Image: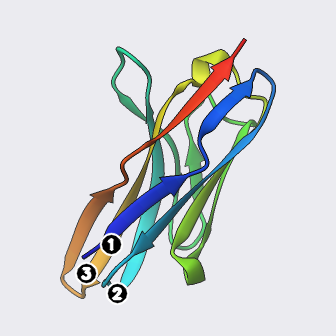
Amino acid sequence: QVQVVESGGGLVQAGGSLRLSCAASGIFLSIDAMNWYRQAPGKGRELVARISRGGSTNYADSVKGRFTISRDNAKNTVYLQMNSLKPEDTAVYYCNALLNMNPWTVKNYWGQGTQVTVSS
C-alpha cells in the first residue's frame, strides 16, 4: 500500500519561514513528478510548485522568488522551503506524487494535507 505523508506545517508570523516535507512510501518502481498544491478557505486548489524527477522546477507566479521546491530521490521525499511568508499564503498544502507502479502504469497519489497559517 502506498502512502504520501506531509509534515512541517504550522503557524508563523508574516515574513517568517517554514519547510514542508512529503515522503512517499510503499511498493512502486519510482516517482515521476512531485508537486505541491494549496487550497485556501473558499478557494479552489492551486498548483504552487512542481519538480520533475530530473530536478526541473516550475512555480506559481505568486510564490516565485520566495518558495523553493527540492527533492531527494533516494528518500522518496520532496520539500517546499517557504520564505518571506505572507498572510495570503495561508492554506492547506497538499503533496501530490506521480508514481510509476510498473513499466506500464502511473498512478497519482495525494497526501492528507498540512495546514499553514501566516499571521499578520
Residue 51 position, x and y percent, is: 54, 59
Asked whether the beta carbons under mark 2 and mark 3 sit within 8 Å of each other, the answer is yes
Asked whether the beta carbons under mark 1 and mark 3 sit within 8 Å of each other, the answer is yes
**Label 1 to label 3, Cα distance in Å?**
6 Å
25 over 50 or under it: above or below? below
In-front residue for pair 101/20: 20
Type of amino acid under label 3: Met
56 over 89 or under it: above or below? below
The numbered dot on residue 101 is: 3
**Label 1 to label 2, Cα distance in Å?**
7 Å
53 over 17 or under it: above or below? below
Mark toward the start of the polypeptide (1 vs 2): 2
Type of amino acid under label 2: Leu
In-front residue for pair 101/42: 42
The numbered dot on residue 99 is: 1
Q: Is residue 81 left or right of residue 101?
A: right
Mark toward the start of the polypeptide (2 vs 3): 2
Residue depicted at x 72% and y 11%: 120
Figure label count: 3
- Dot 1: what SS? strand
Residue depicted at x 62% and y 57%: 79
**Label 2 to label 3, Cα distance in Å?**
5 Å
In-front residue for pair 57/114: 114
Mark 2 surroundings: few (<14), some (14-19) or many (≥20) residues within 10 A: few
Residue depicted at x 27% and y 61%: 108
- Dot 3: what SS? strand
Residue 61 position, x and y percent, is: 60, 30
Residue 67 position, x and y percent, is: 69, 41
Residue designated by label 2: 29
Q: Which image quarter: residue 71?
A: bottom right
Residue 1 position, x and y percent, is: 24, 76
